[in-house]
Image (cartoon, rainbow, N blue to C red):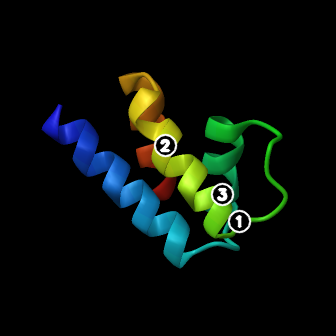
Amino acid sequence: MIEKEKQIEEILQFVTRHKGSHASHNVCSRILGGEFYGIDEQVINQLKSKLPEIDDNEIESCYYIIK
């Protein structure tokens, strides 16, 4: 569980710092689907609420996208 929390935190930090990157948009697309049109604070908040609910394998996939 601690590993998942660490990965989620790193994903959020990456997306927050690199809002325009392909990796950030890929992560948002995987987690939020077509529900976003650019990354802003609202999208970051949606990620914060959805990521803990996502299955461990999908979190790991998103983690590797940003690494």
Residue type at numbered disc 2: Ser
SS at badge 1: loop
Disc 2 marks which residue? Answer: 49
Q: Quadrant of residue 22?
A: bottom right
Picture coordinates of residue 20 (x, y %)?
Answer: 70, 73
Which residue is located at x 75 percent, y 36 percent?
33
Point out the frontmost of discs 2 and 1. Answer: 2
**Quarter that holds the C terminus:** bottom left
Earlier sequence position, callout 3 versus callout 2: 3
Q: Residue at x 42, y 35 (%)?
A: 59
| Label 3 – label 2 distance at C-alpha | 10 Å
Q: How many marks?
A: 3
Q: Residues within 10 Å of mark 1 (few under 14, many from 20)?
A: some
Amino acid type at mark 3: Val
Task: Give the spatial CA distance, label 1 vs label 3.
Answer: 6 Å
Nearer to us in this view, 44 or 13: 44
Disc number for residue 43: 3
Identify the amino acid type marked 1: Ile
Res 23 seen here: no
**What SS does tag 2 mark?**
helix
Q: Residues within 10 Å of mark 3 (few under 14, many from 20)?
A: some
Q: Quadrant of the N terminus?
A: top left
| Residue 39 marker | 1
